[in-house]
Amino acid sequence: MDLTQQLARFVCETQFKDIPQETVNKAKECFLDWHGVALAGITDPASEIITQYVLASGGKPEASLIGSNLKTDMANAALANGLIGHALDFDDYHDETVIHASAICVPSIFAIAERYHKSGEDFLTAMILGIDVAIRVGLGLGDYHYQRGWHSTGTAGTFGATAGAAKLLGLSVDQLVNAFGICGTQASGLRQVFGTMCKPFHAGKVSREGVISATLALMGFTSSKTMIEGELGLFDVLTEAPNEKIVLDRLGQEFYVNHLSIKPYPT
């Protein structure tokens, strides 16, 4: 079974009851941290601009912009909330991959959960699985990927946002494989923009990609079935020495949300 398919099957088949309580507790902690950081980031200039942009874009009032009574469509809400949550660079991250995991996974599933009235258990399951996929793909890309200039939050992160969105939308394994193909061809983000408004934009664009990729796949949109491991796929193009083994190591036994660091101050 191919790597992309194995990750898709893991996401589709794992249920809330399969997740240890300490992992659920850690996810709750990370969600509360993201929520507080996002509320603090609302007045950042980049947040104000992205809010103006999504409101000017219109869209059905499906999902809320954090800290307000404003609503827009799911994809634009994920874009805005993703940027806002990373605007202060105060959100949690994974030490080894430097992925800002909650900032990319929470906004996409937050929008979908609100739109479709999902339960807290559904939300937490999607969050935990999305974070797990993002970090596993990031580990597979290895240190070379980040040192070469790629922003792992914007590359590996899109797979996590898509996995979480797909879980809430109830995609099948085949549909999620397609969704990974859709998001994978959008994987991007360069460290050249660090220190500018585009760094938090990466978190926003990834969150939006998660909503769009999962929704398109649910509607029948297709893509490569081997986006992660295939020739000219993610690992082949964006890193020098991919590690496929680490992506699947202890899959379903070890959840990487447990390894997220919560910052005591912005860095």
Image (cartoon, rainbow, N blue to C red):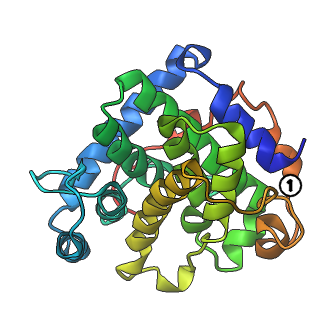
State the residue lying farthest toward the front: 220
Horizontal and vertical percent for residue 215? 50, 52
Q: Position of residue 116 (x, y in %)?
A: 33, 36
Left or right of 41 on screen, residue 7 = right
Tag 1: residue type? Asn
In-front residue for pair 49/210: 210
* Left or right: 233, with 47 as reference point: right
Q: Residues within 10 Å of mark 1 (few under 14, many from 20)?
A: some
Q: Is residue 94 visible?
A: no
Query: Residue 42, located in which quarter of the rendered image?
Result: bottom left
User: Front-most of 163 and 72?
Assistant: 72
Residue at (25%, 73%) from the top-left corner? 50
Is residue 186 or residue 248 the one in the foreground? 186
Q: Quadrant of the C terminus?
A: bottom left
Q: Is residue 171 above or below residue 104?
A: above
Taking the view exactly as shown, the residue that stands out farthest to the bottom is 192
- Horizontal arrangement in the rendering, residue 201 relative to residue 216 (left or right): left
For residue 34, above or below residue 25: below
- Per the image, the residue denoted by label 1 is 243
Residue at screen point 71% across, 79% down: 148
| Residue at horizontal 40 percent and vertical 46 percent from the top | 106
